[in-house]
Image (cartoon, grey):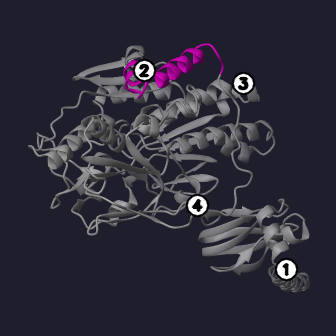
Amino acid sequence: MTKKERQRIVILGGGFGGVYTAMYLEKALGRRDDFELVLINKENYFVFQPMLAEVVSGSIGILDTVSPIRRMLPKTELHVREIESIDTVGQTIITAPGFNLHPKVISYDHLVLALGNVTDFRGLRGLPEHAIPFKTLSDALYIRNHVIHVLEEAAIEPRDSDLRKQLLTFVVAGGGFSGVEVVAELNDFIRGVIKNYQIEESEVRVVLLHALDRILPELDEKLALYAQNLLAKRGVEVRLHARLDAATGVEALLADGSRIPTRTLISTVPSSPNPLIDLLKLPKERGKLKADASLLVENTINIWALGDCALVPMKDGGLCPPTAQFAIRQAKTVADNIVASIRGGQFKQFHFKELGKLGALGHRSAVAQVFGINISGFLAWFMWRTIYLMKLPGWGRRLKVAASWTFDLFLPPELVQLKLTNSQGVAHEHFEPGQEVFHQGDIGDRIYIITSGKAEVVKRDWERDISLAHLGAGEFFGEMALLNQTTRNASVRCVEAMDVLSIPKREFSALAATLPTMRENLEKVMARRQAQRNLQAWFETRL
């Protein structure tokens, strides 16, 4: 059979659904050569999601939760690319360009959609700019580095009480499994290392926000309350009926109007299907693809959907929950049915009854609901580790994790901060009314361009504030301190919810040096503003 005669199965997504579908298809392929496999994913590794929170605390190594897809799937052609578009009519996938700057077009005979969920902050003020998602390995690594960074800063900021309070307040939004597990690991880690920073435990505040009346709504109420009380006992402030509404760089704003000063805001909600799913003209409900019991997308004959991006019916009439154990079983059904469609045979219907649920609470404790039996405490924690250790792909990975867990029992947590980039680059920031962007006398480290909203420039003169100017969309500020290499000569505060682009001094200096006309124009604007301010100050002294 020639390569053109073989049917091509293209799988989108490298999570549980996508990787396990490819694994089952490789087993079915055997020595036959009647189909070929292609998997497209933006990373070349598979993340074992249940253990991701332990990367934050350092209980396991950074790479212990990931496995290279090429080793897991030796018979599958892997494309490590972003997906640009999906054409279900022409049966093609277009991926982002690589080194040759040309997009790659991949045709398919069968398409498997296992794109999963993403943390979606669209429509929420300030969250895209200031909330840290917790979904990927890079998110976990970023959170770990950020937490160590704020502890380092808090250790040398004894005088500024407001800043110290912000630095030592850690907020996690979302009381599901992901939120509870990350807040538990974070709380254990911070309280375990603060003695190295001469920080009192009473100064540390760890807050878990949840919109419902109890955390872990997926579990039995008794278990959820046990977890809630245990976290509270260990110093976590659990706030129920508390929905995160907006964020700035220095505080979390709740729907009831209250504010929590913080420099660390982690959000595990809201979650929605991959944006690529929105663009598909396929049957959907609540943003997810509608699949039948064979995992075929409704009204199609060669498009399959599973995992978090699909609504899959269960035998009892409900819908499958977005968990790994369901995604793995769905992958087996998808693989069997694709093989049946190629080689002939009956389609299988997906039937699976949930075995149980496990949630880690840190400090050698967990909650478990297995075969309808509630288990909590150390025994549940031992089950959690044993079950997930055996589910890790590959014995090499299992041995590495087991070794990390063993060393973690005797050795103190690592405090190394990995700085993987030299500059933050251009950043998006959000400010709320009344909040200061910078204060008079601060060091000039950035220039700001307003994309929406309004700001007021205020100069403190003796015991009064003088309003110098009002700025709106398209205008910029902060250039004077950078061009003159001085401190800020005025304060800028937000007067209407404002989004800005902030350019660090290093990047701004490079632009100004490369584009002399830009620097000249900025200096003209600066001179005009300074003249206006001098004139206004002269009038103020005459009144």
Q: Is residue 359 at all visible to an observer of this figure?
A: yes
Examine the residues drawn in magenta and state their main secondary structure.
helix
Q: Amino acid at mark 3?
A: Lys
- Asked if disc 1 and disc 2 are in contact, CB closer than 8 Å, the reply is no
Q: Amino acid at mark 1?
A: Pro
Range drawn in magenta? 385-412
Q: Local crowd at mark 4 within 10 Å, few (<14), some, or many (≥20)?
A: few
> Under tag 1, what secondary structure?
helix
Q: Which residue is mark 1?
A: 516
Whichever of callouts 1 and 3 sits on the residue coming sooner in the sequence is 3
Q: Which residue is mark 4?
A: 99
- Asked if disc 4 and disc 1 are in contact, CB closer than 8 Å, the reply is no
Q: For residue 318, which quarter of the picture?
A: top left
Q: Name the residue at 61% across, 74% down.
A: 451
State the separation of the CA atoms marked 4 and 1.
32 Å
Whichever of callouts 2 and 3 sits on the residue coming sooner in the sequence is 3
Residue 328 image offset from top left, x and y in percent: 29, 36
Q: Local crowd at mark 1 within 10 Å, few (<14), some, or many (≥20)?
A: few
Residue 170 image offset from top left, x and y in percent: 59, 41
> Under tag 2, what secondary structure?
helix
